[in-house]
Image (cartoon, rainbow, N blue to C red):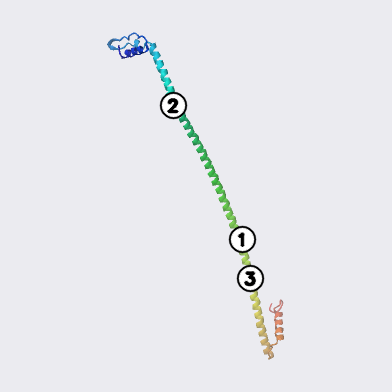
Amino acid sequence: MGAIGTGVAVRHAAAGVPPAPAVQEAGHGEVAWDALFAPDLGLAVWTLLTFLTLLFILGKYAWGPLLGALDARAKRIQGDIDEAKRRREEAEALVAECREQLADGRRRAQALVAEAREAAEELRRELEVGAREESRAILAGARREIERERDAAVEAVRREAVEVAIAAASRLLEERLDGDSDRKLVMDYIDDLARPGGAWT
């Protein structure tokens, strides 16, 4: 009997099953294929019991922890996905806030530029008005000064004219006119000449 037949006989003896008929060996030490594939009830029972026992052991000690580990890993992955989503939403919120702040900063900068332009225009207008008023004041002062100088010059000319007239009259009359009444008479005459329609105007 070959090695396969010996193994089958040992399993049958352990299970209390009467041994099957001996496997007939073919010529040259080969096992007959008909005996090899013949149904064996004891072997089937033991195979089923072994499979169920293995299934129970795997279900209790292997599949539970394996499924738990897979479930924990799935939960961890889902947590990572949720965390990534949360962070992405936070990043998008921060980006939106930064954009809003940037737009607000641009609006403020534009407002400040417009304000500065308006202030510069107002200052230019004020300086222009001040310069005009100052130039007018300078011109008015210059006119007053010119009028004073002119009046002083006219007064000086009048006095010189009086002196010249008195000197000329003294020579002509061969006497000196010194009295206040004589001077007043000459000044009145010169004033008459300086009036509109007079000889000097």
Q: Residue furthest bottom?
A: 174
Amino acid type of disc 2? Pro
The residue depicted at 52 percent of the width and 42 percent of the height is 94
- Name the residue type under label 3: Gly
Label 1 sits on a secondary structure element that is: helix
Q: Residue at x 59, y 56 (%)?
A: 119
What SS does tag 2 mark? helix
Q: Earlier in the sequence, mark 2 or mark 3?
A: 2
The residue nearer to you, when weighing 79 against 184, is 79
Q: Which residue is mark 3?
A: 141
Q: Secondary structure at mark 3?
A: helix
Residue at image mark 1 = 126
Residue 109, position as x, y percentages in the image: 55, 51
Q: CA distance from mark 1 to mark 2?
A: 88 Å
Would you call the spot at circle 2 few (<14 residues within 10 Å), some (14-19), or many (20 or more)? few
Give the x, y percent position of residue 49: 41, 16
- Residue found at the far top of this picture: 21
C-alpha span from label 2 to label 3: 109 Å
Q: Which quadrant is the C terminus positioned in?
A: bottom right
Give the image quarter of residue 175.
bottom right
Residue closer to the observer: 89 or 195: 89
Nearest the viewer among 19 and 83 is 19
Q: Is residue 57 above or below residue 81?
A: above
146 or 108: which is nearer to us?
108
The residue that label 2 is drawn on is 65
The answer to which quarter of the image holds residue 174 is bottom right
Type of amino acid under label 1: Glu
Is residue 69 rendered to the left or right of residue 200? left
The crowd level at tag 3 (other Cα within 10 Å; few <14, some 14-19, many 20+) is few
Q: CA distance from mark 1 to mark 3?
A: 22 Å
Q: Measured along the vertical axis of the image, is residue 22 above or below residue 191?
A: above
